[in-house]
Image (spheres, helix red, strand yellow):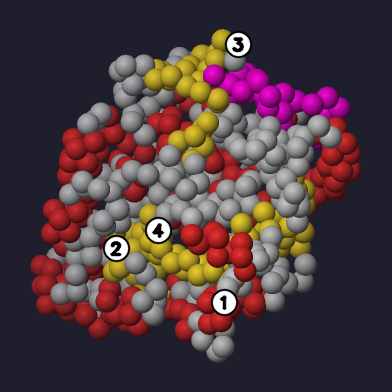
Amino acid sequence: MLTHSYLRKMLHQTRFTLIFLVIVTLSSCSNNGDNKQFEHAGGTFEFALDNELTTFLARNVSDFYSSTVLNQIYEGLVAFEPTSLKIAPSLAEKWEVSNDGKVIKFTLRDDVYFHSHPQFEEKIKLTAEDVVFSIELACTPLKNEETYAYSTIYKDNLKGADDFFQGKTDEIEGLKMSGNIITLELKERDVNFLDKLAQTTAAIVSKKIVEAGLETDLIGTGPFKYLEYRETEDRTHIVLVKNNNYYGKDAEGHQLPYLDSLIIKIEPRNLRQLEMFENEEILLIDGLPPSRISMMLGEGKIDDFNSTPPKLILIRKPLLATQYYHFNLLREEFKDVRVRKAINYAINRDAIVKDVLNNQAFSKGNAGIVPPATFGGYDYTTVKRHSYSYNPEKARALLAEAGYPDGKDFPDINLKFNLGSNHSAVADEVAKQLKKVLNINVNLDGMPFLDRLKDQENANGQLFRSSWYADFYSPESFLMSGYGGSIPDDPTKASPTNHARYSNPEFDAAFEKGKSATDIVERYKNFAEAERILMEDAPYIILWYEETIKVIYSKVRNLYINEMNHYTFKDVYIKDWTKSEWEESIKK
């Protein structure tokens, strides 16, 4: 994975080149005079992210922040419909799946062009060759490591991808092209494969651009183009501008996107984000600090929510997200399952949710890694019976059985967490609880998000703060974090998904059965069995299940909020409401 300083260097190297895109952007308007424009098109939407991007390579995206930005620039063969999260056409206008589910044929659109670049005078049209190249690139080692796309989508899945990755073949056996048809052949049926292809990490890049050494200039096919990475004294700004050559149209034939630009501000301080929001420097605040929720809804501000039309809209809903800590199972002190269970029983999750989070959570972590009551028909009851609740007597007994009565001779634990939000306060509470219940010393190690992510992927530490947001709508998206098949054979190599290095053949067998099952009842039965095994082995400390509390200015239209926190801005526009218009919208 790219380092923080290297990312900045790449951005500054490309900045002056990309400034020329302003001229290209402005001139391209005249080339699209026949495009029907929406009457409320224009304007800028500004919002904040807590952390910097970790990578500029779409095929290696493994975090929310990079995905949120690159998802506006790049596109895949398919996409998530923003409200239902169902699979919708994107660069592929249609597809066919064989009866056995192993072969998928995609028909590409014929009107897609990559963003303009000053080194190429002609417009670069999307071709099937770009798709093949992108998948081969994803299945190629990156600095001798697996890309996130290979690890989570193609490995052990796409026929011939593993041989290609290992350099045994020059082509991927299960990847073919003919005209504008792309055919993918899987080893076995994967009912969630289309959902995996909708992720940012499966984005299609231009072969010409990459081979010219320009991949980090961020040239995609999406509704917005990368313009500038700008640093001020206060923070970083990432500027995206409208792609005037975008093929997308709304239902009435208006050109998409509506907005002229997106400005993403990197601001890790939540209270500073709140100040920016109140000053309309940003139009959305995602995750109010617990100490400020009552203040936002009080101090005379309640009229901003209750007036007709309201100035502000509050959105509170559960997310497909779990907050947890994970052990590094390569460490000798955590190889005894009794130690891991003891630490789990020593954590008072109620106190964390109530006293630290101010109840800003969907619920405490009293089940497995899959958020409860999310997937209808999933056996949460069985999983919950194998979860962990606060039981200090049981915790002390288990630690004593493992050879550490009253914590004697147990080594100090280094807990790594990323700075910002409430992570420091949670880590401090966990450290106090483990000292009180088990007499274990926990040293707190706060660090930037990118550093923590890099350390946990490389097993550089003992205990890590982590979180898992669903990449697609299935229990598989969470359980893949424990799949042993994704662990590299060489322990010195990075493990992009299975950070704990957890391995249990019984878990893997149940997980694989769930992946290939065509019947949803059978699928969920196997996934629940896999999760039961996972919880019995206790590689994680499940803390709480996430919810989102967002406040947005009502004038921001068509910003759809979904359970995956998956943002799509191409339909967004800005327009103040009239009283009559608002009242009419409520009736619908």
**How many residues crowd around disc 2 within 10 Å: few (fewer than 14), some, or many (20 or more)?**
many
**Marks 1 and 2: in contact by CB < 8 Å?**
no
Query: Residue at image x 47%, y 48%?
Result: 83
Give the dominant element type of the magenta stretch: helix, strand or loop: loop
Image-quadrant location for residue 311: bottom right
- Mark nearer the N terminus (1 vs 3): 3
Q: Earlier in the sequence, mark 1 or mark 4?
A: 1
Which residues lie in the magenta part? 107-131
Point 28% across, 65% down: residue: 365
Could you tell me which secondary element the residue under label 4 belongs to?
Answer: strand
Nearest the viewer among 289 and 461 is 289
Res 542 label: 2
Q: Which residue is mark 3?
A: 179
Q: Position of residue 194 (x, y in %)?
A: 43, 31
Q: Which residue is denoted by mark 4 in the rendering?
A: 319
Marks 3 and 2, the one that precedes in the sequence: 3
Alpha carbons under labels 1 and 3: distance apart: 57 Å
Reading the image, the residue beneath label 1 is 307
Does residue 397 belong to the magenta stretch?
Answer: no
The relative height of residue 386 versus residue 378 in the rendered view (above or below) is: below
Q: Earlier in the sequence, mark 3 or mark 4?
A: 3
In the image, farthest residue toward the top: 178
Front position among marks 1 and 3 = 1
Q: Which mark is residue 416?
A: none
**Helix, strand or loop status at disc 3:** loop
Mark closer to the observer (2, 4): 4
Tell me the quarter of the picture where residue 495 sits: top left
Q: CA distance from mark 2 to mark 1?
A: 40 Å
Question: The residue under label 2 is which amino acid type?
Answer: Ile
